[in-house]
Image (cartoon, rainbow, N blue to C red):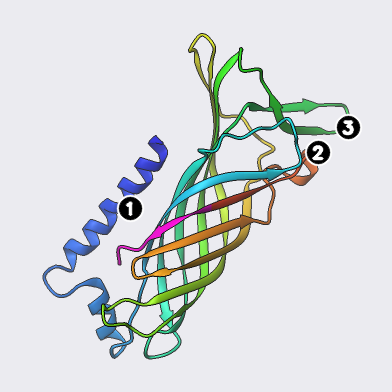
Amino acid sequence: MKQIISILSLFLVLSGIVVGQEADTTSVKAEMEDEEEGIPHLDLMLIDLNWDYLIGNNKSFKQDWYGRGANVSILYDHPFQEDGMVSGAFGVGIAAHNYYSNSVVTRFDTALVSTSDFVDIPDSLMKSIKLSVNYVDIPIELRFRSAVDDRGNRIKVAIGAKVGYRLQTHEKTIDAQNVKLKTFAYPHITKWRYGATFRAGYGSVMFHGFYSISTLFEEQNTVTPYNALQLGVTITPF
């Protein structure tokens, strides 16, 4: 949760600086419209609030329902039409994902290969287990929008993809004696992730999804592949 709050705070401060700098002239949106003869640039900042889940064929690995995370992205929107109904977008973002379960990531070393997987721990020994993974992402989207309605809003649909580089991973455990431990050494969690994205909504609120085609662990270093799934709500301040 601290990671999520930190990410949101950082981007809100940055967006506040941008808006403050433009206060003496026009809004960010209006200024970008003027630069390209009234062509609207929309959905420049995306804030995603996620439900996070790992899909894998490990029956002993039980996840809690409240896995959660957040993404914050800033994208450049390039309209293909003057009305802004079709556009492409690309940018950069930061993502934090948290998975709560009954299992810890365990490394198995043999003479031939080294692998990692989730190993379940009895509730009598462990009260809480959380795996956190943070990425910097490069998202791209193809966006479709309706005409502006009487309220000044549009229906929006976007399909896309993103590639991410893992910044940091740690696992936090709390045992039956309330002893807290953080572990940071996870060499088998893949450095690069990539997958498909989808958004649909109205005005400044959308529903979104992301499915990671790449697996959580390097394929050569695990016997059980896990693919990340995120579902949630997107808020677009501007």
Circle 3: residue type: Leu
Residue placed under numbered mark 3 in the picture: 112
Return the x and y of residue 39 as percentages of the image width and height: 33, 86
Mark drawn on residue 63 = none
The structure residue drawn at horizontal position 43% and vertical position 74%, both measured from the top left corner, is: 156
The span from disc 1 to disc 2 (Cα, nearest Å) is 38 Å
Which image quarter is the N terminus in?
A: top left
Q: Are marks 1 and 2 in contact (CB under 8 Å)?
A: no
- Disc 1 versus disc 2: nearer the observer: 2
Circle 2: residue type: Val
- Disc 3 versus disc 2: nearer the observer: 2
Residue placed under numbered mark 1 in the picture: 11
Return the x and y of residue 116 as percentages of the image width and height: 73, 33
Circle 1: residue type: Phe
Mark drawn on residue 223 = 2
Q: Earlier in the sequence, mark 1 or mark 3?
A: 1
Say left or right for 33 vs 189: left
Image: magenta residue range:
231-238
- Disc 1 versus disc 3: nearer the observer: 1
Above or below, 136 relative to 103: below
Above or below, 171 relative to 164: above
Residue extending farthest to the left is: 24
